[in-house]
Image (cartoon, coloured by chain):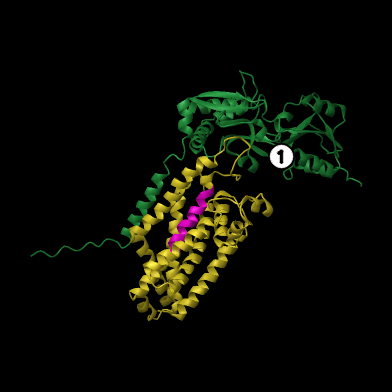
Amino acid sequence: MSSPRPIRKRPRWLAGAINIIAVAGLLYLATFLPPDTSLDVMRGGGTLRVCVPQSAPPLVTGDARAPGYDIEVLQHLAGHLNVRLHLNYNPAIGQDFNPRNWRLTRAQCSIVAGGVIDSTATRGFLQLLPTGITSGWAAIVPDDTSPQPVKAVAVLPSQGLDRLALSGFLREKGIRAVPARSPENLAAALEAGTADMAIADRFTIGAVPVGEIDIRVVWLPEPPFTRLPLAFGLWKGDLTLMRALRDGMTELERDGTLRTIAERYGLDIEPEASDDMAVLLSLAPEVTP
Amino acid sequence: MSRFMHIGRGLYGIWLREVMRAVRDRGQLIGGVSRPLIWLLILGIGLNPYFRGEVYGEVRFVIPYTYLQFLFPAVIVLNIMYTSIQFAVSVIWDREFGFLRAILISPVPRWIILLGKILGGSTVATGHGALVLILARFADITLSWDQVALALLLMFGLSFGLTSFGVILAARVRSFEGFGVFSNTIILPLYFCSSSIFPLDPSLTRAQTVALYPEWLVFLVEINPITYAVDALRGVLINFHQFDPRLGPMVIGGMTVVFFLSALFDFRRR
């Protein structure tokens, strides 16, 4: 007579573990459901519509041979999604402080590009997809070994950056601001010696035609000034389109396309983060009441 | 065996019993899954078109996140609330079927019995909250391990406080049927009045807020402790606060201590 087969006891925790794995798996599968129709609608139309300003070099140039960093990236993204890129040039973008007056609607475009700043205020209105480019206040300073007190700076105001913070800072330091209307004005002020330093946004400062003077291009000190990442703006709630574009951006970054485009527009070289900038500005004479 | 070993084994045994019972109960687990699916997938997607942007510069929902992202931490809290407060059913069950009497005559101190039961309930409730984290991808929320760890800590604190609250309720309710109605009349009002599904815009002053919502509603939201638990989780998961960030952990800590001591007082009287 054979001995009875031993009873194989299942571990006590097995039933519970199976239940937990089952419910976790069910929830994970649910994450693959599309949360909206934005990608389907865009693919159905066969066109990725983008609202851009008339000109915001080097992001949007209006030149067909070198259309700008943002435009070239968007062309690649449209290719990734197998759709055509349609640019809707809107001269109102950036001309008015209040974006409501630009009258950009969902019917005109799925994306806003050409200098959208990644900030909490912008995120209140749009979902943002970072482009890898940073903007902010930058300055041209003479390349002196011994920094001299700055008494006057030429300033070219820029849309999107905090002009009030800049003017408040200069006033507090007792530095006189000389307003400029163009990059050429900035260069002329430096050459004529009416300004010790030129301040503009990071893109404009790179276009200042400085001739013989030895200079350095530096970021304004952080804090109080912040460097602002730029982004593409999508309408809030368009999650499926956002995911598809983010995947496309990841691919462009991985295969080096983003870096190549940035190099073409000189965006791979950023202003220096200079410690003596803070020293230069703190050397400014105190304001006497 | 030392006295501490005895107490530790008693605590572990009671905790393990609660956890094993919960993970083997398919009905309870289905509840833990269906709530996030209904609230996040159905309600979140259903209302998404009403909160999405149509004109740049004009939104009905001035927060730097999508509606799904805003709702996500609140759904975690909802799952924890249901599981924690419903845990009191286990206390009623143990009382009805004599298990509680059996362990109360054991040498394990009463407070350890209560702590074991509450820790068990809190572990299960935290687990149900953690299940919702799986849906983070759906809501387009990217989480780092630091964020997950901090969220789990807050979730455990909240679960502990609410499970203790469930035990306090169980001491006052004599039947399963009565508890079902009682728990729904507590959970849903607390949830809806916690700024879970509509935001009190932090950029507005109090005067502007009461111009947008009736003052009584703003008052209910502000005195509701769950409001601050939801806010603390929002801070960790989507980096958005409607209230002072210090209030969330303070309120959760306060709930944990006050409700556990009250539950202990009730438990000792029995």
Tell me if B12 is positioned left or right of A97 in this view.
left
Which quadrant of the structure image shows residue A14? bottom left
Q: Which residues are magenta?
A: B70-85
- Please report the residue visible at 62 percent of the width from the left and 59 percent of the height from the top: B246
* Residue B229 colored in magenta in the image: no
Of the pair B95 and B260, the residue shown nearer to us:
B95
Whole-percent x and y of residue B166?
46, 68
Tell me if A120 is positioned left or right of B169 in this view.
right
Is residue A204 depicted above or below B60 in this figure?
above
Whole-percent x and y of residue B101?
36, 78
Please report, as a chain letter, where disc 1 is located. A
Residue wearing tag 1: A273
Image quadrant containing the N terminus of chain A: bottom left
Of the pair B179 and A35, the residue shown nearer to us:
B179
Of the pair B255 and A168, the residue shown nearer to us:
B255
**Disc 1, SS:** loop
* Residue B84 colored in magenta in the image: yes
Is residue A64 depicted above or below A132 in this figure?
above
The amino acid at mark 1 is Ala
- Please report the residue visible at 57 percent of the width from the left and 67 percent of the height from the top: B254
- Please report the residue visible at 48 percent of the width from the left and 63 percent of the height from the top: B186
Neighbour tally class for label 1: few under 14, some 14-19, many 20 plus, Cα within 10 Å: some
Is residue A261 depicted above or below B38 in this figure?
above
The residue positioned farthest toward the right in the image shown: A289
Question: Is residue B141 in sight in this rendering?
Answer: no
Which chain gets the green colouring?
A
Which quadrant of the structure image shows residue B8? bottom left
Question: Is residue B96 in sight in this rendering?
Answer: yes
